[in-house]
Amino acid sequence: MMELNWAILTPIIILQAILTIAALVSCIKQEETNGPKWLWIIIILFINILGPILYFVVGRKN
């Protein structure tokens, strides 16, 4: 069986956690978003790295 290389995976996991937390905090604090806020929270939580990136690019209403 193939062993996991934690030296490669750890930065990716940390990046994903930071992006997810930052996107959730931003979404909760934002008064208006492009689309329903509850849907953005689901997208952020369940679409791994792309969910938070999508929120920052498309979901925020400036």
Image (cartoon, grey):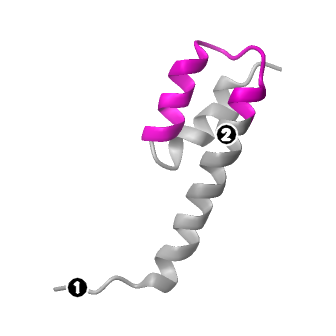
Residue stretch in magenta: 26-46
- Tell me the residue at 28%/87% (across/down): 3
- Tell me the residue at 52%/75% (across/down): 10
Figure quadrant of the N terminus: bottom left
Whole-number angstrom distance, CA of label 1 to CA of label 2: 33 Å
Numbered mark located on residue 23 in the image: 2
- Tell me the residue at 61%/41% (across/down): 53
Side (left or right) of 61 relative to 8: right
Question: Is 54 in the magenta?
Answer: no
Does 3 appear above or below 55? below
Does 39 appear above or below 19? above
Q: Residue furthest right?
A: 62
Q: Amino acid at mark 2?
A: Ala
Q: Earlier in the sequence, mark 1 or mark 2?
A: 1
Side (left or right) of 42 relative to 25: left
Position in image of residue 27 (x %, y %): 69, 29
Check disc 1 and report its element: helix, strand or loop: loop
Does 4 appear above or below 55? below
Q: Nearer the viewer, residue 50 or 41?
A: 41
User: Overall secondary structure of the magenta stretch?
Assistant: helix
Q: Amino acid at mark 1?
A: Met
